[in-house]
Image: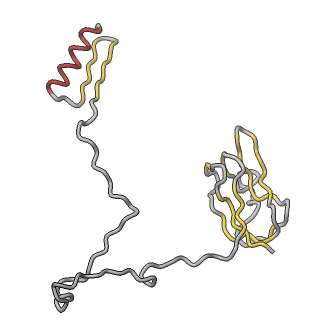
Amino acid sequence: MNQKELKELIEFIIEKGIAEFELERGDVKVKIKRASEAPPSALPDSRYFAVHPAPVAAAAHIPASVPAKVEISAAAVPVPEPEEDLHIVRSPIVGTFYEAPSPGAPPFVKVGDPVEIGQVLCIVEAMKLMNEIECDVAGEVVKKFVANGQPIEYGQELFALRTK
């Protein structure tokens, strides 16, 4: 198939409105996919939410000249209570998180374990190198944020520690 034939084929596909076309001739294989011409519908902005006023039956006693006023009280929007001041251990590198020195071995630390400065918390494998991540404060492990074998990013939270 030469360039002229290919150009004619593309023009024909556009003219007929064909979305997908595949052709095999001997050892030559041509596959053409056209993008949809309709732009994708925009998703609503998740920063905004709808507030529905009271049903008409409940608001029937309000005179028409008084505009309805919708308020959101602080009690209606639950505010998460801040957790106690915890020290967060973050990944210093990109890699794969391992909680134990080898498969089948017990993890370096578990939730509830006391930890000391310099104690190994986990291993992050990066470029076939095993990097031990050590604890920089003394305290207790309160939470583990990642699973064994999970890929992690630079600065990602690994552990939450309650300091002594």
**Residue 108, position as x, y percentages in the image:** 77, 60
Q: Nearer the viewer, residue 124 or 163?
A: 163
Q: Which residue is outermost to the bottom?
A: 61
Question: Image height check: is 33 above or below 93?
Answer: above
Q: Nearer the viewer, residue 106 or 60?
A: 60
For residue 46, side relative to residue 78 (left or right): left
Q: Nearer the viewer, residue 109 or 12?
A: 12
Number of marks in picture: 0
Write down the quadrant of residue 71 in the picture. Answer: bottom left
Write down the quadrant of residue 73 in the picture. Answer: bottom left
Q: Residue at x 21, y 85 (%)?
A: 66
The quarter of the picture where the C terminus appears is bottom right
**Residue 19, position as x, y percentages in the image:** 22, 31
Judging from the image, the colouring scheme is secondary structure
Question: Image height check: is 25 above or below 22?
Answer: above
The quarter of the picture where the N terminus appears is top left
Q: Residue at x 25, y 8 (%)?
A: 4
Q: Which residue is outermost to the front?
A: 65
Q: Residue at x 63, y 58 (%)?
A: 146
**Residue 122, position as x, y percentages in the image:** 74, 56
Q: Nearer the viewer, residue 101 or 20?
A: 20
**Residue 148, position as x, y percentages in the image:** 65, 55
